[in-house]
Amino acid sequence: MDRDKYDKVLEACALKKELEILSLGDQTVIGEWGINLSGGQKHRIQIARALYQDAEIYLFDDPFSTVDAHTRSHLFKEVLQNKLRSKTVIYVTHQVKFLPAADLILVMKGGRIVQAGKYNDILNSGTDFMELVDAHKKALSALDTVEASSGSEQTTSEGEGDIGTTNGKVQIEENQGNESGKVDDVGPKGQLVQEEEREKGQVGFSVYRKYITTAYGGALVRLIVRAMILFQSYQIGINYWMAWGSPMSADIKPPVGSFTLIIVYLALAITSVVCVLAISMLLGTAGYKTATLLFKKMHLCIFRAPMSFFDSTPSGRILNRASTDQSAVDMDIPYQVAAFAFSVIQLLGIIAVMSQVAWQIFIIFIPVVATCIWYQQYYISSARELSRLVGVCKAPVIQNFAETILGATTIRSFDQEKRFQDTNMALTDSYSRPKFHVASAMEWLFFRLDLLSSVTFAFSLFILISIPVGVIHPEHRNTALPADHESELLRGTANNGLGDSFPPQGQAH
């Protein structure tokens, strides 16, 4: 950036005073649609952008209409007559008093050019331009009459912006322009648009309680937990029934016939399927109802929020809450909570079975659970903050994309496509980095849990074949978990339900 040229442009566009008022000067973030700027400030910034480009042709569509008379005169003198005196300038205006300085005047009427020439030439050559000049003079005379009849206090206040002939008009336009009236909205850090806040530390139990009890006061959640307990009980019953009813060898007579064994097995399996169906239906209903209620509350809060909320909150941040976060509430959180609950129930069921069948397994079970808890505590602190960082980094991507689409015409006119492309890629990279680290942290956990489950399974087999005969009844060995189920169990215990899905893929063994 050419600093000397930059300062001269600010001086020519009368922006020095505005930048001195702002606590962060030209580093102050401008809200969407220039929400913390007045109309005159917006136009002067647009003029400054165009002036800094140093183009050969300039097109101005009445840019001085929103500023007061003093600023208007300053801009006309410094910008059009000084900085752009050697440039081609096409200037559309209703300000008749600036026309004498124009090299060529085109008078438009009904979408057509009706007169063209110098000011004095067209003033004497037709009636259309004369009518416009006379109307302007009459308006100024009427304002002067109102000013003369007003009190002394009003006269004093209006005189501060007087340029000699348009005192009343200056006061009206200053009130409309409100050149610095919105600076008071700037926040305590000097920025109207503050950085997005995010929570730190673990999620309190009150958050989970609020989510669980949102739909029907948590009545469906109690039914879901009972259905999960029944499902796990039937799975344990199937394993016990098959282990008890199946003959150990061809020489031993089975306690029940094959037909009875199959019928009871089918009855337990069908009941388990009914439990899974009930869990899925209840979970879908509870998740849908909870997501709907939360969305309605968010919708109500947004529509009842004060205007200051929209001044300091970018639309991308609101869209992120209403799209990505709402999608997580709709599709992910119900199944993650259900997977965690089922993992806990499954773990308790396995502990109950193993305590009855082979209590010696607790010699391995206790240190394995302690290791999983240690992994979980080590992993969850990082994964939680990374997940929050992902949510915070996504809003700027949405916001920048929306602003780019909205200002595509301005971006193309100033030939700034490359800069906005680089900005978009930088924001995308900032969002992708924590996303990648989330996946890496999860793989880090899964690799260690898989390794732990494999080592535990191998050690358990070694113990089972090494213990004396008769310590564990042979028919009870069928109740041991296969390696893949043990791995999934350890994952669910340490990962606290993150990344799992429901319904579980439980089968009889």
Image (cartoon, rainbow, N blue to C red):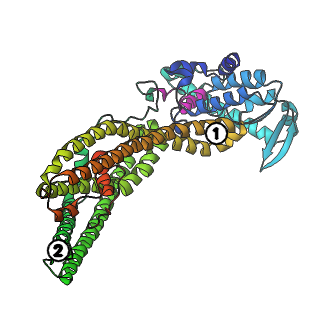
Q: What residue type is labelled 2?
A: Gly
Q: Is residue 152 magenta?
A: no
Q: Would you identify the image quadrant in which residue 226 lies?
A: bottom left
Q: Does the magenta stretch include residue 171?
A: yes
SS category of the residue bearing label 1: helix
Q: Would you identify the image quadrant in which residue 6 lies?
A: top right
Instruction: Judge left or right: residue 202 versus residue 184.
Output: left
Magenta: main secondary structure equals: helix
| Label placed on residue 52 | none
Q: Which residue lies furthest to the top in this view?
A: 4
Residue under pointer 1: 421
Residue under pointer 2: 245
User: Between tags 2 and 1, which lies in front?
Assistant: 2
The residue lying toward the viewer, choosing from 435 and 55, is 435
Q: How far apart are marks 2 and 1 (CA)?
A: 70 Å
Q: What residue type is labelled 1?
A: Gln
User: Picture coordinates of residue 428 (x, y %)?
Assistant: 55, 40
> Magenta region: which residues?
168-183
Crowding around mark 1 (Cα neighbors within 10 Å: few <14, some 14 to 19, many 20+) is few
Q: Do the residues labelled 2 and 1 touch (CB within 8 Å)?
A: no
**Rendered position, 245 above or below 138:** below
User: Picture coordinates of residue 302 (x, y %)?
Assistant: 39, 47
Query: Which quadrant of the figure contains the N terminus?
Result: top right
The residue lying toward the viewer, choosing from 75 and 318, is 318
